[in-house]
Image (cartoon, grey):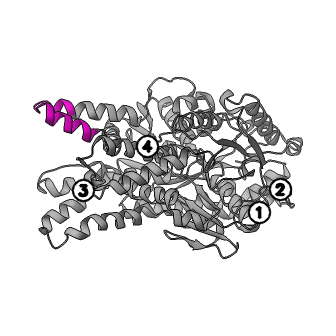
Amino acid sequence: MRFLDHAPTFLFFTGKGGVGKTSLSCATAIHLARQGKKVLLVSTDPASNVGQVFGQAIGNRIIAIATVAGLSALEIDPQLAAQQYRERIVGPVRGRLPDAVVKSIEEQLSGACTTEIAAFDEFTTLLTDANLIAVYDHIIFDTAPTGHTIRLLQLPGAWTRFIEANPGGASCLGPLSGLEKQRRQYADAVTALSDPNRTRLILVARAQKTTLDEVARTHQELAAIGLSRQYLVINGILPEREAEHDALAAAIHRREQETLVAMPSVLRDLPTDYLPLKASNLVGVEALSSLFSDRDEITSVNTETIGHATDLPRLSTLVDEIAGAGHGLVMMMGKGGVGKTTLAASIAVALAKRGHSVHLTTSDPAAHLTDTLSGSLDNLDVSRIDPQAEVARYRQHVLETKGKDLDAQGRAVLEEDLRSPCTEEIAVFQAFSRIIRESRKKFVVMDTAPTGHTLLLLDATGAYHREAARHIDPLLHHTTPMMRLQDPEQTKVMIVTLAETTPVLEAAQLQDELRRAGIEPWAWLINNSLSATATSSPLLKQRASFELAHIEAVRTSYARRVALVPMHAEEPVGIDRLLNLVEPESVSDCAGAPCRS
């Protein structure tokens, strides 16, 4: 593995959700620990599943991995970090200020910005703590999906510039005049990230056009902030031998090879490793240890047992039920890489084809709906909540309203405050709220960011709801965005998953989080199911057999409604292929190996 040659202290694994960042970072940690190195594995993903991979509770403190000598792990828990952060600020004034003032401070610190900053403080500490660095030879970061990670890696520089430009001001970090320690810490983090002798960034991708296009953008964005030492790992490539067995395997292999040949030019000069698709899920130390080897045990599979999974409804059944309402919000949620963007686009296309007015949008910083649609359709509008555009809109609005009567000094102070990175949270939330309101008259289909990022957005929605409830006369009729999300007549949340261990467990955790917020998921979608095809490839058949227990768990333990979406031979890009996910024209859509029906 080229990315392991002369490995520096810090290794960052990043990329689009579902490409195998966690498996790769865990396998790397095991590999280095077995070479006698002291290794710390850190997850910065708000929806971390490192503990599930090792079969061991980890959490927000460093803990030794029982099955691997020399390896420890830490999952940065944004909610716990935020709670501790709030207490550091509120604790000293509790009992000294009136209760109403303390409660107001606590409410101001209850939003997603505080959560992000608290997790960010822990992240920068790991990069700059000399005592910690002295203990470990390598600190490996398993990061959140791309958009969230780019923001995390940009924040040290953003906050450093903001503090330097506003030495006497204030922000959601607190009074900036007292933040000299943080200023030094953030500046040291910038230095560590941009030093190629200390930090290496590993871009993880699949042999898919959309994934490689996103990796190319990530490469350029991170290089622009000084992270120049980058490596590329293309994971999960179907071995050529499997293409001999059926049309589905042959189509997948052909598509992957054509994608690699047409790889974006900016990636061609990066040191690159290629890893084959494995027959089983990479959960547990022994399975992870095989990731860097060619060995793969494939056993015979009873195809009759696989056919039992196909009695689940298809996506068309759920779309028919959604269409009956005439309007409303449909939100696709789930782990990165499970296909939320594709399924959101396919549902939007199907509703538009039925004559409904549809707005298809995304809150994912790394999503590109126009690439997926690759065309236009009557009745369908497409948009993206672009954080930069929303921040510009929000700043302009505040300056034109609150700033219009200020003198030059007051306006300068307001402009400084609006340069805070926290402004993005407010601006994105306002855009989210506008889109929710649209669903009263039309269908709005939203492709959300991966789980952790979406929960932070919902956290902001909940904070606004609580603040509004405190100030609005309870006798007056009012509806907050959170109330709309909680109303099943107005909002249908669909949880998207794959029939694999980690995606199903994470989807179940997401469902618990949503229920705690008073939001009841409407349905689950099991995407890219091999068990819903009749593949003859030994490797794909074995992966199909592993799906069965997870499909049964979703059907019996988690979902009130569930639909199964088969794996298709052709990448679902373009209006016609997206529509075929909902309303297949023929069994050949699953490519030679027909869809089971």
Identify which residue is drawn at 33% across, 35% down: 391
Instruction: Tell me where the magenta segment starts and ends, as one range.
Output: 399-418
Give, as a three-letter code, the residue at label 2: Ser
- Quickly name the residue at label 4: 157
Q: Given the image, on which type of amino acid does mark 3 rest?
A: Gln
Q: Amino acid at mark 4?
A: Gly
- Are dots 3 and 4 in contact, CB under 8 Å? no
* Label of residue 108 in the image: 3
Lateral position of residue 4 relative to residue 94, left or right: right
Q: What separation in Å lies between label 1 and label 2 (alpha carbons)?
A: 8 Å
In the image, residue 347 lies at what x, y percent? Answer: 52, 39
Is residue 402 among the parts visible in the rendering? Answer: no
For marks 4 and 2 on the same chain, the one whose residue lies earlier in the sequence: 4
Mark 2, residue position = 293
- Count residues near mark 4 (Cα–Cα under 10 Å), then give few for <14, some for 14-19, many for 20+: some
Q: Which mark is residue 186?
A: none
